[in-house]
Amino acid sequence: MTMDLAYSVLKRFFGFDEFRGCQRDVIQRVTEGGHSLLIMPTGGGKSLCFQIPALVFAESMKERNPLTLVISPLIALMKDQVDRLKSLGIAATFINSSLRKSEREQRYAAVSRGHYSLLYVTPERFRKPEFQEILRGRYVCLLAVDEAHCISEWGHDFRPDYSRLGEIREQLGNPITIALTATATPDVQQDIVRQLRLGAADVQLFHEGIDRLNLELRVEEVWDADEKQTAMQEIIDRWLSKPDGCGIVYFTLIRTLEEFSERLAAERIGHVCYHGDLDRGARKAIQEEFMQGDARLVLATNAFGMGVDRDNIRFVIHADVPGSLESYYQEIGRAGRDGEPAECVLLYDQRDLNTQMEFIRWSNPDAEFCERSWHLLTHSTEQVRSFGIDWLRERLCDRQRHDRRIETVLSLLHRYGLIEDENDLSDLEISGDLPAALADPELRNAKLLNDQKRLYALVQYIRSDERRGYLRDYFGVS
């Protein structure tokens, strides 16, 4: 009976007659009250695996006015998903930091009055007592944890607030839970279940595999910037000569991106550039230009991609070696979402490994550096407010201009909710104590070693004769 309703919802709202892949089995498991972990390639239809159950619960439990809570770190993607659901007549909304205070309060009030079947939020929203208060008056029937790899410190995009989701689950009354991601090694899969405070026997794993046969995976070895440009241009020219060809070229460093932007501009190849040093308005405008088809080529750092859901991306080029197989796989996953052939090429210059090793050092400051940073932030707050990050770097990094460890510390403190803004220290306020995870030498060393191992795994992938097989082994797919 439950699956009859699921098929009815699928047809009525989404216009499909049949489920795809393991969607049916996942939805049956969730609607029958079972916890699930779903690993499915980008573009495989993960969202339906919690949206359909949410609508089934909304119709079958009307007297309880159930609410499905969707946890996501992707603010940009939230709006897109909610807009689409609303266009289909589904009662959905989101609450995040992009809203003005008056808009947030209006949505709080609407949730409290019993409106909406689906509510999208970031995990940071649970820091707000007023948000927790409105949820106490609602029956949360389903908790969907999107981008679930963010829950694991050993994953490639750890977010501390995700690690509170086990506690949050208990506060919500231990609702049915589905965790979803495109990338998780066996260790990260186990960590997701543990962090959600679920027993391994209580969670069914659904693994759709990682093979997307329409993607051509290739590595080309290059020896200098000129060879890199030649290889890059050959791919760009081939696809941009077609009416609907478009693509992304990923770079590690902004200065390298800008260098190649000048090179391509000299060849009269039109493109846009996207990186983290641009202000939020510029980044949003560039992303929209690409999404709407006005720009066909974007040069970007890994800041670009979250919320990018253009289905006809025909090529993704990595002009530099990425930091891990997880981030590489996530980035190539933006190609060929329409199922048509797409090209994913990694341009391998061995010297790029030195850059990644430096990045790993910057992103893993040791416990002693974290404690010295904390001491300055808490005992010299006025100087930090007045002179900013350069003042901190002079005292912590022996004036090494390219050392980025202090940026990492500030980013981590922001993610732990201890500072409000990692980029603007003029109104710095510190709340709480230095997290144990940043002060423990063994934990800091273990994190450094883990990141080094993940870079080594990427090098092994580059050298492998059977790359698809290597990816399957790495991600634990039989």
Image: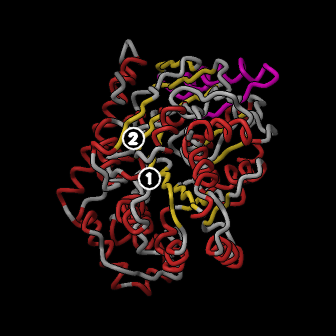
Q: Which residue is mark 1?
A: 176
Q: Which residue is mark 2?
A: 356
Asked if the stretch drawn in magenta spans residue 244, the answer is yes
Residue 290 is situated, as x and y percent measured from the top left of the image, at: 74, 41
Mark yes or no: residue 399 visible.
Answer: no
SS class of the residue under badge 2?
helix
Does residue 126 lie above or below 118 as drawn? below
Q: Is residue 283 left or right of residue 120?
A: right
The residue most toward the front is: 1
Does residue 87 lie above or below 421 as drawn? above
SS class of the residue under badge 1?
strand
Mark 2 crowdedness (10 Å alpha carbons): few <14, some 14-19, many ≥20: many
Determine which quarter of the picture holds residue 187. Answer: top left
The stretch in magenta equals 223-250
Q: Earlier in the sequence, mark 1 or mark 2?
A: 1
Determine which quarter of the picture holds residue 456. Answer: top left
Residues under numbered marks 1 and 2 in contact, where contact means CB atoms less than 8 Å apart: no
